[in-house]
Image (cartoon, coloured by chain):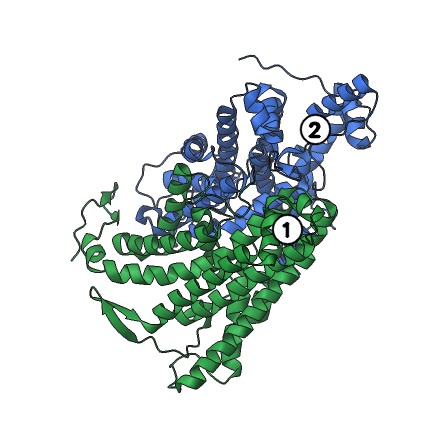
Chain colours: A green, B blue
């Protein structure tokens, strides 16, 4: 039963946008929880953007492909283990955890590797030549094309259906909304990885190097920081997190890996990073979760086809109010 | 407002750019003497159908030439925004789409709006895109650099998603038999049909020449100098009294109008508009044409557009690999020629260098390439 409160009506009398308030109110909690689990995936991918942006001031457009390579790695790991898309097998807990860990390692390795290779092949030669910033962006677009097309030529245009090892079972209920084990794992994994990354950047010696390069590359080099190694590590961490996000994504989304699949998620993740304030690690978490939740509210309020529109409108609105994101840039705090 | 023109840099002492120097040193008459046969040749291309250039077995040559010309028009429009004013716009396809949709809505029998002739809708399409340029520009142009890039990218996506979801825009079904310019052949069939690309190509080339003259005049006027100032250093321009926001809107709206124009032409030639043609990849290709040719240089972006549009059509046999090759080409080109095939013309900076040399008797040391600068001004602590 739709209220069609303020349905905007055009000349033909067709209402093309409706406000389904009932569904919004009824599914508020389940939307919130589902949104949080989507949001944590966005947040993990967003970290890759934020780290690279913080250090190099570069929108790494190819990061979405780094992510999708991880998704393919997950798929092939499961496929290689003998599982096929379709029914979820009944597995003993011990084996299940083992397989998931294996897939996680594979995804992280492939994504991390892709990110490092990307940095080596595409960005380092530019840095050596002192190329202007716009050139990096165009190269990133070019690299994104190349990585996508390699997948396309290899696997074709059809998406690979997700192979799921973990049943999506309900664990408990909050306010009438069911919380599934996949949701819990996604959110927990994301938060743990976030805390880990935050600790790494803020507490370790290497993290100090990253912050130093983010603040002032030249001075950092003079102070004995190996800039090239810091940049490579930054890409590596971003890639590893994208790999982890890819496994979570494949557990959640039935139509998982496709050669273009990374693109829209990449844009969302970048949006999340910008929302929180790009260059800010905690901002990425906040932006990701916020984006996931708001998107889900929008979906239930306006209908599924408006999901992405809500995301982009939110981006424009927040940037209009706070031009540097909610938390502002902070990886190099003293940057003028 | 008086449009003052800067005298061309005739006495440039630099030897780095012999061809452009040679060209700028020619008197007007000689420039025309070179240009007119060249333009005539460009007009004759689809009729001549030269053997090596032809795309014939794979793709109809006149239609291919129209595609190339359409890209060139888009590139000129985007060059105003990216190349001259230094505003990184990743959602230019949005304006292109709006132009195409306005054309379709007013001329296709599938739409419920009243039908108007093509030539009437063409300016309407441009005006509507300009309005959208203001709508997008007013809130967002206060953002800088990468933030502006991501917002425009979002705008392009919003336009595409609206075309998907808003019922009167008919999503994937699209609009059939979009209008075309008047005129009939001797046998009564319409001159501008979607099977014959030649008249469309001529129309497009004519519009390109018109737009080039217009944009060239703008470039040499106060507006153009304000754009270069904003591109090179926005803060400095603002401090020196350039109303940066106003001129950024000007650039945005001007670019949008040209995008809308090419979108409308595209809709007319294809005769069919649906939501499939306006994705971000197209936007990236537009941007690639500009950067590839050399942002800020009109001749350069024309060249870039020709490369981006022509190569895939010429080599249909490798169509499956075209984006792969394209991506690789972008990376390699950016490594070896970061300023594009032809770099930006920087007459204003040239003046600065000359003055510096005269004053101090040595070469200048500070150089700024604006949006192409190595690092953000003010980024260094």
Q: Which residue is mark 2?
A: B346
Q: Position of residue A129 (x, y in %)?
A: 74, 46
Q: Nearer the viewer, residue A151 or B191?
A: A151
Q: Residue at x 50, y 59 (%)?
A: A199
Quadrant the N terminus of chain A occupies: bottom left
Q: Is residue B198 visible?
A: no
- Residue B7, numbered label: none
Q: Which residue is mark 1?
A: A139
Q: Is residue A333 visible?
A: yes
Q: CA distance from mark 2 to mark 1?
A: 24 Å
Label 1 SS: helix
Chain letter for mark 2, please. B
Q: Left or right: where does residue A293 sit relative to residue A126?
A: left
Q: Position of residue A196 (x, y in %)?
A: 49, 63
Q: Nearer the viewer, residue B6 or A65?
A: A65
Query: Tag count in the figure?
Result: 2
Q: Are marks 2 and 1 on the same chain?
A: no
User: Which class describes the residues within 10 Å of circle 1: few (<14), some (14-19), or many (20+)?
Assistant: many
Q: Residue at x 45, y 41 (%)?
A: B100
Label 2 SS: loop
In the image, residue A242 above or below residue A333: below
Q: Residue at x 54, y 53 (%)?
A: A51
Quadrant the C terminus of chain A occupies: top right
Chain letter for mark 1, please. A
Q: Nearer the viewer, residue B62 or A285?
A: A285
Q: Position of residue A104 (x, y in %)?
A: 50, 73
Residue B78, picture quadrant:
top right
Q: Position of residue A66 (x, y in %)?
A: 56, 62
User: Which class describes the residues within 10 Å of circle 2: few (<14), some (14-19), or many (20+)?
Assistant: some
In the image, residue A127 above or below residue B10: below
């Amino acid at each position: 039963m739709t209220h069609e409160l303020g349905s905007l009506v055009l000349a033909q009398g067709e209402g093309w946008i409706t406000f389904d308030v009932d569904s919004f109110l009824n599914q508020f909690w389940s939307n919130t929880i589902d949104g949080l689990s989507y949001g944590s995936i966005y947040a993990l991918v967003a970290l890759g953007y934020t780290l690279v942006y913080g250090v190099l001031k570069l929108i790494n457009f190819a990061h979405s492909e780094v992510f999708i390579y991880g998704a393919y790695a997950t798929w092939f790991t499961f496929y290689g283990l003998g599982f096929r898309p379709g029914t979820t097998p009944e597995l003993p807990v011990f084996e299940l955890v083992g397989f998931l860990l294996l897939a996680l390692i594979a995804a992280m390795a492939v994504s991390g590797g892709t990110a490092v290779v990307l940095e080596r092949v595409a960005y380092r030669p530019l840095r050596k030549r002192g190329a202007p910033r716009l050139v990096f962006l165009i190269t990133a677009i070019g690299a994104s094309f190349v990585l996508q097309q390699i997948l396309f030529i290899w696997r074709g245009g059809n998406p690979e259906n997700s192979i799921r090892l973990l049943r999506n079972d309900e664990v408990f209920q909050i306010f009438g909304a069911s919380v599934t084990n996949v949701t819990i794992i996604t959110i927990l994994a994301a938060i743990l990885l976030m805390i880990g990354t935050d600790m790494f950047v803020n507490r370790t010696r290497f993290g100090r190097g990253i912050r130093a390069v983010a603040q002032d590359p030249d001075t950092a080099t003079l102070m004995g920081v190996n800039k090239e190694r810091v940049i490579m590590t930054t890409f590596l961490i971003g890639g590893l997190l994208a790999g982890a996000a890819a496994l979570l994504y494949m557990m959640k989304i039935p139509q998982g890996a496709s050669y273009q699949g990374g693109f829209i998620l990449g844009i969302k993740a970048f949006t999340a990073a910008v929302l929180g304030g790009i260059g800010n690690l905690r901002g990425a978490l906040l932006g990701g979760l916020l984006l996931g939740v708001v998107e889900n509210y929008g979906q239930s309020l306006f209908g599924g086809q408006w999901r992405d529109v809500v995301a982009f409108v939110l981006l424009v609105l927040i940037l209009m109010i706070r031009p540097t994101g909610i938390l502002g840039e902070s990886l190099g705090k003293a940057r003028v | 407002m008086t449009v003052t023109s800067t005298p061309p840099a005739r006495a440039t002492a630099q030897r780095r750019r012999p061809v452009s120097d040679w060209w700028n040193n020619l008197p007007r008459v000689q420039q025309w003497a070179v240009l007119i046969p060249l333009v005539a040749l460009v007009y004759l291309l689809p009729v001549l159908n030269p053997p090596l250039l032809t795309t014939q077995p794979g793709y109809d040559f006149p239609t291919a030439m129209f595609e190339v010309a359409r890209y060139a028009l888009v590139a000129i429009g985007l060059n105003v925004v990216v190349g001259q004013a230094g505003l990184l716009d990743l959602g230019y396809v949005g304006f292109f789409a709006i132009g195409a949709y306005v054309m379709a809505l007013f001329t296709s029998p599938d739409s419920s709006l009243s039908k108007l002739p093509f030539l009437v809708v063409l300016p309407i399409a441009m005006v509507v895109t300009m309005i959208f340029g203001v709508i997008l520009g007013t809130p967002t142009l206060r953002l800088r650099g990468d933030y502006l890039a991501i917002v425009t990218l979002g705008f392009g996506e919003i336009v595409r998603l609206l075309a998907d979801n808003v019922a009167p825009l008919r999503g994937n079904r699209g609009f059939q038999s979009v209008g075309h310019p008047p005129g009939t052949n001797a046998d009564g069939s319409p001159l501008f049909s979607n099977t014959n690309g030649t008249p469309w190509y001529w129309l497009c080339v004519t519009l390109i020449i018109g737009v080039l003259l217009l944009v060239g005049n703008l470039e040499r006027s106060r507006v153009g100098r304000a754009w270069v100032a904003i591109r090179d250093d926005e803060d400095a321009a603002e401090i020196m009294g350039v109303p940066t926001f106003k001129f950024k809107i000007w650039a945005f709206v001007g670019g949008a109008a040209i995008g809308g124009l090419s979108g409308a032409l595209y809709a007319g030639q294809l005769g069919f508009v649906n939501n499939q043609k306006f994705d971000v990849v197209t936007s990236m290709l537009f941007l690639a044409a500009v950067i590839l040719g050399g942002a800020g240089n009109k001749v350069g972006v024309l060249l870039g557009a020709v490369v981006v549009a022509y190569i895939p059509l010429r080599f249909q046999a490798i169509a499956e690999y075209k984006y792969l090759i394209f991506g690789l080409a972008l990376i390699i080109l950016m490594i070896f020629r970061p300023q594009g095939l032809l770099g930006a013309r920087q007459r204003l900076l040239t003046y600065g260098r000359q003055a510096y040399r005269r004053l101090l008797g040595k070469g200048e040391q500070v150089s700024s390439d604006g949006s192409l600068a190595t690092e953000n001004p003010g980024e260094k602590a």
